[in-house]
Image (cartoon, helix red, strand yellow):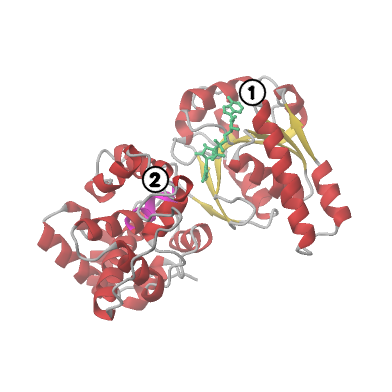
Amino acid sequence: MIIGIIGSGAMGTGIAQVAAQAGHEVFIYDTNDAALTLSQHKLEATFLKLVEKGKFTADLAAEILTRIKFEDNLRAFSNCGLVIEAIVERLDAKRSVFGTLEEIVTSDCILATNTSSLSIAAISAKLKNPERMLGIHFFNPAPLMPLVEIIPSLQTAPEVTLTAEALIKSWNKVTVLAKDTPGFIVNRVARPFYSEAIKLYEEGLADIATIDWAMREIGGFRMGPFELTDLIGHDVNYVVTETVWTQFYYDPRFKPSITQKRLLESGLLGRKTKRGFYDYREGSSKAAPNTDQKLGQEIVDRVLALLINEAIDAVFMQIGTAKDIDLAMTKGVNYPKGLLQWANEIGLETVLNRLTELHSFYGDDRYRPNPLLRRMVAENQSFQLS
Ligand code: NAI
């Protein structure tokens, strides 16, 4: 099958690499010639590195690269079996590109969007055949992150979902099925990792170095929330939080932080601008964390209780199966274990007690325990994850 990729930025380039490595001929298109050239150079450099590391022979790397064709005309996509769109995150731009594409591809071509925050329903609504369209959401960097969320819209034909799922699995990816709701699974469930950590800092419970230390060393997360948001960039991370919050009709559970907004407004976007929560300029030093175990545990317990509550809500609202929700967080954002498995290990009653205490202390609906958690505790149940 020939694969078409629209948009040769960070995601499009990565997805093109994954598809070519899986043996497909790939066409990649961008309206910006410089972006196409950059994508080609990036892929050449990537394969050079992979050869140096011994992952591919030089011959195989060259063969994979020749499978990728860089196109400045969408007409080249006429024989594609699947087209994945990864252009700028704007509804009008995405609708327009799919409108053009629909006139070019054959009727059995599957159309997919890699959107992180727009609804699949809205993007596909204007298509002549919305049943052939769905969300196929990769994580950054696409060649390294195993997870792909598969998101059918209300109008997607079941066989389109099944075909897309099987194909992406054959690319050596782990797929999870997610409902077409804000943030899908990962970008919804992960919100408290950032927002509750920032709230702890705003309240003065601990400084950023201490919260990062606690989440890493006691929580087992690969990076702390402040170093991670500095790496992601506050422009990207804040906008995801704000989008999820507004799309959930301003549910306080997802409320963004003013501290992070101020960083964004100041242009302190993180590592890429050399300042964010931390200072990365030459000569600057990082404050040492307070390594008090009791404080560290308190930080982890609070953030984890909110993350677990969010994972439980995703089960309750049928966004995905319990198994898929755990898979999504371990394979999409490298959590040390699935949040529902973690809940089972801590004990659902302990999680409920932590949330109830926070809810009663703050009187803020952000901490309200999920009804499914209450019910499972009342019925002495745990999550079945196998
Ligand atoms: P990017 O800014 O790196 O690349 C976007 C590319 O699309 C640019 O090269 C631009 O020239 C091109 N483009 C813009 N309008 C176009 C059009 N009408 N036709 C053809 N090409 C056009 O963006 P990035 O980060 O690769 O994101 C792309 C999509 O993937 C967005 O929908 C984003 O939400 C989603 N996404 C991004 C992730 C990330 O971490 N960067 C993760 C998962 C999804």
Q: Is mark 1 within 8 Å of ligand 1?
A: no
Give, as a single range, the part of the protein colored magenta.
184-192
Can you say whether 106 is above or below 278 in the image? above
- Residue 102's disc is 1
User: Residue visible at 40% across and 75% down?
Assistant: 217
Disc 2 residue type? His
Q: Position of residue 191 (x, y in %)?
A: 35, 53
Which element type, helix, strand or loop, lies under badge 2? Answer: helix
Residue at numbered disc 2: 234
Mark 2 vs mark 1: which is more N-terminal? Answer: 1
Can you say whether 277 is above or below 53 in the image? above
Q: Viewed as shown, does residue 376 lie left or right of 272?
A: left
Would you call the spot at circle 1 few (<14 residues within 10 Å), some (14-19), or many (20 or more)?
A: some
Q: Position of residue 384 (x, y in %)?
A: 42, 70
Can you say whether 56 is above or below 220 in the image? above
Observer-nearest of 386 and 231: 231
Would you call the spot at circle 2 few (<14 residues within 10 Å), some (14-19), or many (20 or more)?
A: many
Q: Is residue 150 magenta?
A: no
Disc 1 residue type? Glu
Quadrant of the rendered image holding ligand 1: top right
The prevailing secondary structure element of the residues shown in magenta is: helix
Q: Residue furthest bottom?
A: 293
Observer-nearest of 232 and 243: 232
Observer-nearest of 338 and 179: 338
User: Residue visible at 43% across and 57% down?
Assistant: 228
Q: Image quarter for residue 248?
A: top left
Q: Is residue 176 visible?
A: yes
Q: Viewed as shown, does residue 130 lie left or right of 286?
A: right
Q: Is residue 380 visible?
A: no
Observer-nearest of 75 and 215: 215
Q: Nearer the viewer, mark 2 or mark 1?
A: 2
Can you say whether 72 is above or below 37 in the image? above
